[in-house]
Amino acid sequence: MAIIHRIRPKYQNRKEEIVADLLYGTGGATENELETVIKRKAAEISIAMAVLHGGEWRVQVDHEDGFVHITRRLGGTRELPAKRG
Protein backbone atom coordinates (compact mmCIF):
# COMPACT_ATOMS: atom_id res chain seq x y z
CA MET A 1 0.00 0.00 0.00
CA ALA A 2 2.81 2.42 0.81
CA ILE A 3 4.44 1.86 -2.58
CA ILE A 4 1.18 2.50 -4.44
CA HIS A 5 0.75 5.73 -2.52
CA ARG A 6 4.20 6.88 -3.56
CA ILE A 7 3.70 6.25 -7.28
CA ARG A 8 0.15 7.62 -7.51
CA PRO A 9 -0.05 11.21 -8.69
CA LYS A 10 -0.94 13.88 -6.15
CA TYR A 11 -4.07 15.95 -6.69
CA GLN A 12 -5.05 19.36 -5.38
CA ASN A 13 -8.23 17.96 -3.83
CA ARG A 14 -10.47 14.91 -3.67
CA LYS A 15 -12.61 16.13 -6.58
CA GLU A 16 -9.61 16.18 -8.93
CA GLU A 17 -8.68 12.68 -7.83
CA ILE A 18 -12.20 11.36 -8.49
CA VAL A 19 -12.33 12.95 -11.94
CA ALA A 20 -8.89 11.53 -12.80
CA ASP A 21 -10.00 8.05 -11.70
CA LEU A 22 -13.16 8.32 -13.82
CA LEU A 23 -11.20 9.44 -16.87
CA TYR A 24 -8.68 6.64 -16.36
CA GLY A 25 -11.55 4.15 -16.12
CA THR A 26 -12.94 5.18 -19.51
CA GLY A 27 -9.79 3.96 -21.20
CA GLY A 28 -9.65 6.92 -23.57
CA ALA A 29 -13.25 6.51 -24.77
CA THR A 30 -14.54 9.01 -27.31
CA GLU A 31 -17.26 11.53 -26.51
CA ASN A 32 -19.86 9.52 -28.46
CA GLU A 33 -18.92 6.35 -26.58
CA LEU A 34 -19.28 8.15 -23.24
CA GLU A 35 -22.71 9.49 -24.25
CA THR A 36 -23.75 5.92 -25.06
CA VAL A 37 -22.56 4.77 -21.63
CA ILE A 38 -24.60 7.53 -19.96
CA LYS A 39 -27.74 6.58 -21.92
CA ARG A 40 -27.26 2.91 -21.06
CA LYS A 41 -26.76 3.57 -17.35
CA ALA A 42 -29.80 5.87 -17.22
CA ALA A 43 -31.87 3.17 -18.94
CA GLU A 44 -30.67 0.61 -16.39
CA ILE A 45 -31.82 2.88 -13.56
CA SER A 46 -35.24 3.39 -15.16
CA ILE A 47 -35.66 -0.38 -15.50
CA ALA A 48 -34.70 -0.85 -11.83
CA MET A 49 -37.24 1.84 -10.82
CA ALA A 50 -39.94 0.03 -12.81
CA VAL A 51 -39.09 -3.27 -11.09
CA LEU A 52 -39.10 -1.67 -7.64
CA HIS A 53 -42.02 0.74 -8.01
CA GLY A 54 -44.00 -0.44 -11.02
CA GLY A 55 -45.22 1.74 -13.86
CA GLU A 56 -43.43 3.05 -16.90
CA TRP A 57 -40.43 5.34 -16.52
CA ARG A 58 -38.84 7.77 -18.94
CA VAL A 59 -35.30 9.05 -19.20
CA GLN A 60 -34.18 12.51 -20.30
CA VAL A 61 -30.48 13.22 -20.75
CA ASP A 62 -29.44 16.80 -21.48
CA HIS A 63 -25.72 17.23 -22.01
CA GLU A 64 -25.94 20.98 -22.62
CA ASP A 65 -27.62 21.74 -19.28
CA GLY A 66 -25.84 18.87 -17.54
CA PHE A 67 -28.61 16.75 -16.08
CA VAL A 68 -30.19 13.30 -16.25
CA HIS A 69 -33.87 13.09 -15.36
CA ILE A 70 -35.68 9.81 -14.68
CA THR A 71 -39.38 10.03 -13.91
CA ARG A 72 -42.51 7.94 -13.95
CA ARG A 73 -44.59 8.47 -17.10
CA LEU A 74 -47.84 10.32 -16.52
CA GLY A 75 -50.74 7.92 -16.45
CA GLY A 76 -48.46 5.06 -15.47
CA THR A 77 -49.69 2.70 -12.78
CA ARG A 78 -48.43 3.18 -9.26
CA GLU A 79 -49.00 -0.44 -8.28
CA LEU A 80 -46.00 -2.25 -6.95
CA PRO A 81 -44.98 -5.41 -8.80
CA ALA A 82 -45.90 -8.71 -7.11
CA LYS A 83 -43.34 -9.92 -4.58
CA ARG A 84 -41.30 -12.91 -5.65
CA GLY A 85 -40.65 -15.95 -3.58
Image: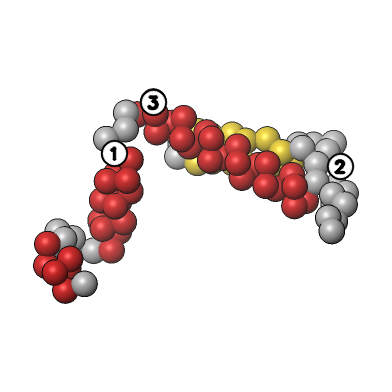
Residue at the spot 43% in from the left edge and 31% down from the top edge: 35
Q: Which image quarter holds the N terminus?
A: bottom left
Q: Is residue 47 visible?
A: yes
The CA span between labels 1 and 2 is 41 Å
Q: How many callouts does the rendering have?
A: 3
User: Which residue lies most toward the bottom here?
Assistant: 2
Amino acid carrying mark 2 in the image:
Thr
Pick whichever, 1 or 80, lies toward us. 1
Pick whichever, 65 or 51, lies toward us. 51
Specify the label residue 77 is tagged with: 2
Q: Are marks 1 and 3 in contact (CB under 8 Å)?
A: no
Q: Identify the mark nearer the N-term, 1 or 3.
A: 1
Q: Position of residue 62 (x, y in %)?
A: 50, 33
- Does residue 77 sit above or below 20 in this rendering? above
Could you tell me which secondary element the residue under label 2 belongs to? Answer: loop
Amino acid carrying mark 3 in the image:
Asn
Q: Identify the mark nearer the N-term, 2 or 3.
A: 3
The CA span between labels 1 and 3 is 14 Å
Residue at the spot 53% in from the left edge and 35% down from the top edge: 40
Q: Position of residue 65 (x, y in %)?
A: 46, 36
Specify the label residue 32 is tagged with: 3
Specify the label residue 27 is tagged with: 1
Q: Identify the mark nearer the N-term, 1 or 2.
A: 1
The CA span between labels 2 and 3 is 34 Å
Could you tell me which secondary element the residue under label 1 belongs to? Answer: loop
Specify the label residue 17 is tagged with: none
Left or right of 29 on screen, residue 51: right
Residue at the spot 14% in from the left edge and 69% down from the top edge: 3
Could you tell me which secondary element the residue under label 3 belongs to? Answer: helix
User: Which residue lies most toward the front here?
Assistant: 85
Disc 1 crowd, CA 10 A, few/some/many (<14, 14-19, 20+):
few
Left or right of 73 on screen, residue 83: right
